[in-house]
Image (tube, helix red, strand yellow):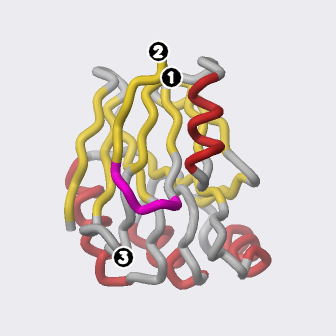
Amino acid sequence: MKIAIISDTQDNLINTQRALEIINQSGAEAIIHCGDLCSPWILKELTSKFAGPIHLTFGNNDAEEFLFMEWTKTEGQNAKFYKPMGELELGGKKIAFTHYSVFGEGLAATQKYDLVIYGHNHLKSEQLVGQTLLINPGSLCGIGQPASFAIYDSENNQVTFESI
């Protein structure tokens, strides 16, 4: 199973649209977003342009939690928010995701998950912590670093970084 991993969109509609084109072409079956959408209209773009499930957690710049939650009840029903972190099983893998690196690193250290994902610092990275793959997809907004996201393939436990 291919899973798109994004974080820190920070209201960048153009990069979000470009990423969605690549995500849809890749055959990804789900999206995990690690926070900092910033405003609900980015959620609207994600839910209207991607048909599969979208799993999201809140970041430090997501002030409109109520509006995000209301959107998922009406039109964006393929989106689900988790707070303060998400736990899933997708493609036969146990996955945890959060916004902050310190929590992601701690989750990876538990060795309870096959994959742990975080965002926040905008620095794309991939490392193996014991048997757990720890990924930061970078930021989709491109602030401080070139815009990036990742595609994770659960069949071969590999990540590919995509640049916008």
Residue 53: percent from left, percent from top = 52, 51
Residue 26: percent from left, percent from top = 22, 49
Specify the label residue 143 is tagged with.
3
Q: Is residue 116 magenta?
A: no
The tag earlier along the polypeptide, 2 or 1, is 1
Residue sitting farthest toward the right? 66
Q: Nearer the viewer, mark 2 or mark 1?
A: 2
Left or right: residue 142 versus residue 71 is left
How many angstroms separate mark 3 from mark 1 (CA)? 29 Å
Looking at the image, residue 74 lies above or below residue 35: below
The tag earlier along the polypeptide, 3 or 1, is 1
Please identify the quadrant where the N terminus is shown: top left
**10 Å neighbourhood of mark 2: few (<14), some, or many (≥20)?**
few
Magenta highlight range: 120-124
How many angstroms separate mark 2 from mark 3 (CA)? 31 Å
The residue pinned by badge 1 equals 114
Task: State the residue at coordinates (50%, 22%).
Answer: 114
Task: State the residue at coordinates (57%, 63%).
Answer: 35
Residue 62: percent from left, percent from top = 66, 75
> Which of the 4 quarters of the picture holds residue 96?
top right
Task: State the residue at coordinates (45%, 34%).
Answer: 134
Residue sitting farthest toward the top? 131
Is disc 3 in contact with disc 1, using a CB cutoff of under 8 Å?
no
Callout 2 amino acid: Gln
Would you say the magenta stretch is mainly helix, strand or loop?
A: loop
Left or right: residue 101 versus residue 157 is right
Is disc 2 in contact with disc 1, using a CB cutoff of under 8 Å?
yes
